[in-house]
C-alpha cells in the first residue's frame, strides 16, 4: 500500500486513540475509506487487548504455574496421589496403579 495510505492510518489512529473508547466507533464511521477504517480499528483492538510491557518489576509478572493434575484425578489406570516436581520438560507425580494395586 502506498505511503500516503499509512500516513492517513497513523493520523486517524492517533486521533481515535485520543478519544474516549465509547466515541471511537462513531469517529471512525466518518472515515470515507473502508480499508482505512478497518486498519485503524485493527490497531485500536490490538492496543486495548495488549498487556502493558513492564508495568512493574519483571519478576512480579511471573506467576507460579499450578500442576496440571490434582490428587484424586485418574489418568488411565493410575490415580494421582501427589505432585513430586516439575521442570522444563514436564511434571512428575506419585501415583497408584489401580490395576496392579501398587504405587509408582
Image (tube, helix red, strand yellow):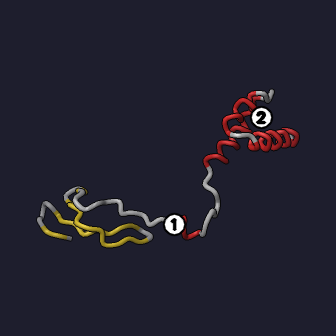
Please name the residue shown 55% across and 70% down the image: 59
Q: Taking 59 as reference, is 54 left or right?
A: right
Question: Mark 1–mark 2 contact, CB under 8 Å?
Answer: no
Residue 40 position within the rendered picture, expressed as x and y whole percent measured from the top left = 74, 39
Coordinates of residue 19 in the picture (x, y in percent) = 74, 40
Measuring 63% from the left and 57% from the top, which residue is drawn there?
52
Disc marking residue 62: 1
Residue labelled with disc 2: 36
Which picture quadrant has residue 9?
Answer: top right
Q: Secondary structure at mark 2?
A: helix
Front residue of this view, candidates 95 and 24: 24
Q: Give x and y (percent) for residue 23.
A: 71, 34
Q: Which mark is residue 7?
A: none
Q: Nearer the viewer, residue 5 or 47?
A: 47
The front one of 94 and 44 is 44
Residue that lies at the very extreme toward the right in this rendered image: 4
Q: Which image quarter holds the C terminus?
A: bottom left
Residue at 77% from the left image edge and 34% from the top image edge: 36
Amino acid at each position: 500500500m502506498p505511503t500516503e495510505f499509512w500516513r492517513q492510518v497513523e493520523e486517524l489512529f492517533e486521533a481515535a486513540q485520543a478519544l474516549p473508547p465509547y466515541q471511537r466507533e462513531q469517529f471512525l464511521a466518518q472515515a470515507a475509506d473502508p480499508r482505512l477504517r478497518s486498519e485503524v480499528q485493527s490497531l485500536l483492538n490490538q492496543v486495548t487487548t495488549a498487556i502493558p510491557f513492564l508495568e512493574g518489576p519483571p519478576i512480579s509478572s511471573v506467576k507460579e504455574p499450578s500442576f496440571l493434575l490434582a490428587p484424586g484425578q485418574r489418568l488411565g489406570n493410575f490415580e494421582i496421589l501427589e505432585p513430586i516436581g516439575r521442570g522444563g520438560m514436564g511434571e512428575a507425580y506419585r501415583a497408584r496403579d489401580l490395576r496392579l494395586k501398587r504405587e509408582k
